[in-house]
Each structure stands twice: as structure tokens, then as C-alpha cells.
Image (cartoon, rainbow, N blue to C red):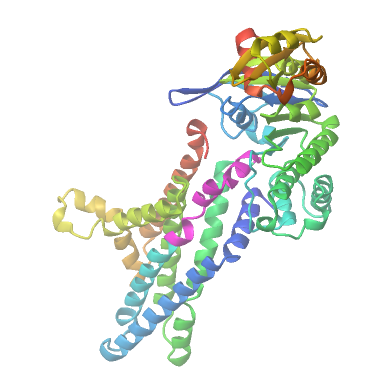
Amino acid sequence: MSAVGVIVRRELASFFGRTRAWILAGTFALLGGYLFYSEVAFFETFGGDRLTTGLWPFVFLDWRLVAFFVVPLLTMRLIAEERQLGTYELLCSLPVGDAAIVAGKFLAAYVAYLIMIAGTLPGPIALYVLRPYPLGSVVAGYGGLVLLGGVFVACGLAASAVSQSQMVSAILTYGILALFWYASWNEAALSETLTPVVRAVSLFDHYSGFAQGVVDSRSIVFFVALTLFFLFLAVRALGSRMWRGLP
Amino acid sequence: MIEARGLTKRFGGRTAIDGVSLDVATGETVGFLGPNGAGKTTTIRILAGIFPPSAGTVRIGGEDLARDPMRARARIGYLQERPALYGEMTVEGLLRFVAALRGVPGGAARTRAVGRAVERARLRTLEGHRIESLSKGTRQRVGLAAALVGDPPVLLLDEPTAGLDPAERSEARALIRALAPDRAVLLSSHLLEDVQAVCDRVVVLHRGRVVAADRPAVLAARLAARTAVEVEARAPAEALARSLERVPGVRSVTVEHADAGVARCRVVPEPARDVRAELAAAVVASGWDLLGLTLLEPSLEAVFLDLVEHGGDVP
């Protein structure tokens, strides 16, 4: 098994060996389930008969909020905790590069995120059993959540790599993601030349297409590129020990 | 096996180590001695490849650490000061993790490597225990087992006996001695007795510079040369001092305190002479009451200062 695989396995065992992980996964499933139920109830009353426009966009916009709240709590420990406890020094003394450490930590947290996302599946499945519907919108929505999760996890990992404090890492992740999320919130506050640039980097603008069942290849490229950018920052943050020293 | 040349490390405006050079051959155990803050941990971290020096070079088994850090690091077993280990893992789980990252092939080979490290660190009955449930001394042994797993030819041990009780310390020293013959071992300590017990050679670091390199016995003799004895008696101060000066093996006597018929003298004996019995006999023979006799062993700090002031055999 490669160094990345070894780190992924240890991280997953460590993550799911703790109560906190199960609380986070439970919160995700519970909140996701409740929001799904309330959107279905709302749709039954006011949504008309088109699930594509009346239900799924709202469900997936709700779920990305759950992901927004939960992922920084999942990622905040990834490197900050190792620095705090000193285990990072052990890792650094082994023949493993910073890129392998980052890749291993990212993949482990991403797998944990995907397991959490899977916890929302019973809702759509139950609905399908009761009232079959075209699957395209749901697949697109989940695709958006999967891609968005990559950005969230990578951002959280980068924030975790710059601080010894898990709390600081979480707050930093919320701050950065909120900035990317709300960048295009008020276009009136932006100049005409700046608006297209801000919209191009707005997580909200890219994700809303997926929530509405539309898969845009530009958005896929954007999410993947932003994920890689944050992973690059995480590698650079780890490399800072070269001139800063430990912890 | 370890060749370090002109290592310098600056953190911002502070120079942690300045031009440190040392060599450790296979089969040799070198002690890195110095007071707290001397730069021992910084040097060992550089040798372990945790961060690079600001200047200087390190070669591990001929591999340049800067040019090929992964190959060089694969040859190093590192025990950090106060080893931080993944508390939620079992001893076996941690050793398997370290072995895998050190490139030990999976299956039977990894099981053998882990078993050997467990055996050497005397952890046989504790393999399935979670690390967080172990005592400090046992965790230190787990850290040592992690450094040993995969049989790296170089061992860097940063304060391997720190925080251990006397029995655990003696056990740790015995283990290091047993490991030494086919490895290059560099261990740091601020205890001369540690390096005396296990090292062939000592490199003394003070304020980031190598101030001496010698055999442990030579340093121990230097330490013994600064030993003094404090004698307290119910006697006239001057008469007590004259009486003690006449004892064979005494180099000098200084009156330190005299009050209400009680005098306290500091007696410096000749190097490696224990004159306590003769001093006691001299006091009693003069008809005075002996109130106290204390051996004053100098701190290692004093020896370091002596080395700094008067020089040593700097390599």
C-alpha cells in the first residue's frame, strides 16, 4: 500500500473511532433528513407537480448548508491536532512527503464526507419507492454536493495546516467558505467589470446550477480547480516548517 | 554513517545552532550533551530531516539529506523528546503504521519487523493495548520501538531517558547499549550519567556551538575535579580551617560562615579524592562537635561553563 493509502486508513480508523465523528455524521443525517422532510411537506402543499423545479433545488440548497456547517468541524483536527499533540513531528521524521500527507488526509476526510452524504440517501430513495421520478435532477444535485464537498474539505485541510488550534482552523474555514459563497451576494455593490469575475469564483453561482439539475462542465472545472488550489495551499503551509521550524 | 558539516540554523533573527559538525560511524554511540536551550533538539531535528539547516550539509549513509530526503529519512529511526504518539492506536497498530510508511513490505515481512521491535523494546504483553492507556515510561519504550521498526541503521534519540524513573532509565540505557553494535546512534541528554553509561564519545554543545568532544570518562573526571565538601562544626572558624587544611588530599579550605561558635567551611579536595572520612576524623580528634558533612557535586552546567571558559578538544 502506498504512503497515501496508509495515511488514509489510519485517518479513517482514527476518525470513526471517536464519538465526535459519529455525532457529526448523526447531525448530518438528522439535519439533512429533517430538511428533506420539510421540503417535501412544503412541496406537497405549494410546489405543484414538478419535482425538478419545486423540490430538488430546495433540497440540495438546504443540504449544502448542512455541509457548510459540518465539514469545518470534520476537517479542523486534520493537521492542527497533529501539531498540537506533537504527532506531526513523528510523521515528518518518516520518509513521507508533504504532498502525500496532504493527499492522505484529504482523501480520508473526503471519504468521511461522502459517507455523511450517503446518510441523506434514504429520503430520495423512499420518495422514489412511493412515487417514482426521473433521476437526472437528483444525480446532478448529488454530483454538485460531491464536488462542493471537495472544495469544503480541501479548504478545511488548508486552514488546519496553518494553525495549531482546531478552533482557529474551523473559524478560518467558515470565513473563507463564506467569502467564496457570498462573493456575488450583492451585485449592486460591485462594479460592472468586477461582477463577472466575482460571479466566476462564487461557490453559490456554480453550485446552484447543480441544485437545479443542470451540469455545467465549467462548474466542474471550477470546483476541481478550487479543490486543487486549496490542496496546494495546504502543502505550502506544511512546507513552512522548513523556515519556521516546528511545531 | 552520519556526517554533518557546518550546520547553522536561524529562526528569524535568532541563531539556534552555529556551525555544528559531527560524525557518527556505524557501531558508535555518540552522546550529545548540553544544557537546556543549547541547540541539541534543533540539531537532531535537522539530522532527522524535519527541517533543513540554514547552512551546512547532512549525509546519512552517504545520501545527501537535502538532495534525497526520502531515501535518507528511510534510514533514520527518530525518537523525539517526550514522544508524541497516536493515543487512540494500539501499540501494534502504531508500529505497523510506522513500518508501512518506512517502506517495510506488507504481510509476513511487516509482521516480523513489528515483532522484532516489540521484542527489543520489551512490549510483548502490551501489543494490543491502546497507547493512551500506557504509563509514561512504557510510552517512551513504544516511541523507541517506533524508531526501531524496520531496522534503520541510524538512530537519533532526543533525550531518551527524560521523565523516566531510575529503574526505567536504567532499562532504557541497557536497551540502547544492546542496539548500538550494528547502528550509528546519536543521543542527546542533559545528564552526564546517561552518556557515561552508553556512549563511546561525547559532543558538548553550548549556546549552539560545539565546545568540546571527548570520551565520557574525561568529562566525568572534569566534573569530579570540581567536587567540594562542606564541613559544619561547633568550633572556632580559623582553628577549624587550619585543622582541615592539614588533612592529606585537601587542596584548599574556605571559611564560608561563622556565627555563635558554629563554623562552616568549604573544602576542595584533590581531583578524584574522597576525603570525607578523614575530614570527619580531624574534627572529632580536635574535640569539636561535627554538625554536618555534605558532598557538593557541581552541576553539569558548571562543567559546561568550565568548558566554555577554558576550552576543550573541539573537533
Can residue A158 be seen from the camera position used here? yes
x then y, percent, for residue B308: 61, 13
Determine if the magenta segment contains residue A206.
Answer: no
User: At 37% from the left edge and 68% from the top edge, which residue is drawn?
Assistant: A64
User: In the image, what residue occupies the spot 82% across and 48% down?
Assistant: B122
Q: Residue at x 58, y 24 (%)?
A: B38
Near-viewer residue (A225 or B33): B33
- The image quadrant of residue A48 is bottom left
Q: Identify whether B195 is placed above or below B6.
A: below
B57 displayed left or right of A112: right
The answer to which of B90 and A150 lies nearer the viewer is: B90
User: Which of B68/B230 is in front?
Assistant: B230
Reply yes or no: does residue A82 show up in magenta. Answer: yes
Q: Is residue B70 left or right of residue A116?
A: right
Q: Position of residue A111 (x, y in %)?
A: 54, 63
Q: Could you tell me which residue is drawn at 49 percent across and 74 percent down?
A: A26
Task: Using residue A79 as the reference point, say whether residue B131 is left or right of it.
Answer: right
Relative placement, left or right, of A221 versus A185 is right
Percent across and percent down for residue B241 are 69, 11
Q: Quadrant of residue B184?
A: top right
Predominant secondary structure, magenta span = helix
Q: Which residues are magenta?
A: A72-95
Task: State which quadrant residue B161 falls in.
Answer: top right
The answer to whether residue A213 of the structure is visible from this angle is no
Is A217 placed above or below B61 here? below
Q: Is residue A196 above or below residue B42?
A: below
Q: Residue B248: percent from the left, percent from the top?
A: 82, 9
